[in-house]
Amino acid sequence: MCQGRSEVIGCVERTEIPNIIKRWFRAATIVLSVKCSIEYEGRASSKASSAWRLVIIKEDGTLLIHGPEGRNPINWQPKAYVTVKAKEDKIVIEALRRHPKEILKISVESDADIMIVRLGHGRFLLHGTEKEIVDYIAKNPHVVEAGAQLVSREVSTPHGRIDVVLRASTGDLILVEVKRSTADIDAVYQLNRYVKYYESLGIKVKGVLAAPALSPAAEKALAKLGFKYVKVTPPK
């Protein structure tokens, strides 16, 4: 039986979208099907051309933009302050974070189908932690690179602790950053800080990101920096 926790507003004229977002932001989850283009500026920059997309604005300010394929959003902004700017014929949804400073802009180009949803919190049991992945890699270093051997775990640096340090058959060190779920661009930047630190000491190292999945932004950043991704799922 339906519980009346969703309000299907239906097709809304473009000029009314700002009013609906202002009314429901922080009060419920807002779901829009809309034609839009996207710009992001922050620790990196990206642009997405005009297309029909699914935009989700959660109560804590988290904003996700999905395309027609895959489970990962093409853009997202965690716990942001969301505003809508309407000037002349332009309507732009902005999701702003201050620490780190970054902004995601969605230029609305059409009317939108909108649904308002009041979601709740249920009990959540997590099976498979980051520590379990670290333990698995430590016991099976070959999953990262054939012939690799364990050097240490939880190695302290001025930039944080490296999850796993291995030694390749060539003698080079392998620094492994581990994530228990989809690794995003923050994980790549963290790995890069570890690599740069070791290189500043004159030590030759490789950077590896180990996680069950990888965001598109993280994939691009890894390729640019020359790091490796290894798919590792939490042991059951």
Image (cartoon, rainbow, N blue to C red):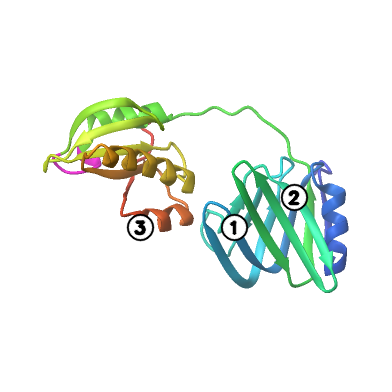
x, y (%) of residue 214? Answer: 43, 50
In the picture, measured across the screen, residue 208 lies left or right of residue 151, that is right
Residue assigned mark 2: 82
* Label 1 – label 2 distance at C-alpha: 15 Å
Q: Which image quarter holds the N terminus?
A: top right
Q: State which tag comes first along the sequence, 1 or 2.
A: 1
Mark 1 near mark 2, Cβ–Cβ under 8 Å? no
Amino acid type assigned to the residue bearing label 1 in the image: Glu
Q: Nearer the viewer, residue 29 or 217?
A: 217
Amino acid type assigned to the residue bearing label 3 in the image: Ala
User: What's the residue at 79%, 57% (across, down)?
Assistant: 84
User: What's the residue at 43%, 29% (across, down)?
Assistant: 129
Q: Nearer the viewer, residue 100 or 55?
A: 100
- Residue 120 seen in this snapshot: yes
* Label 1 – label 3 distance at C-alpha: 20 Å
In the picture, measured across the screen, residue 58 lies left or right of residue 8, that is left
SS at badge 3: helix
SS at badge 2: strand
Q: State which tag comes first along the sequence, 3 or 2.
A: 2
- Residue 13 seen in this snapshot: no
Asked if residue 189 lies in the magenta stretch, the reply is no
Residue 41: numbered disc: 1
Q: Quadrant of residue 136?
A: top left
x, y (%) of residue 157? Answer: 36, 29
Residue 223: numbered disc: 3
Estimate how packed mark 1 is, as few (under 14), some (14 to 19) or many (20 or more) residues with alpha carbons within 10 Å.
some
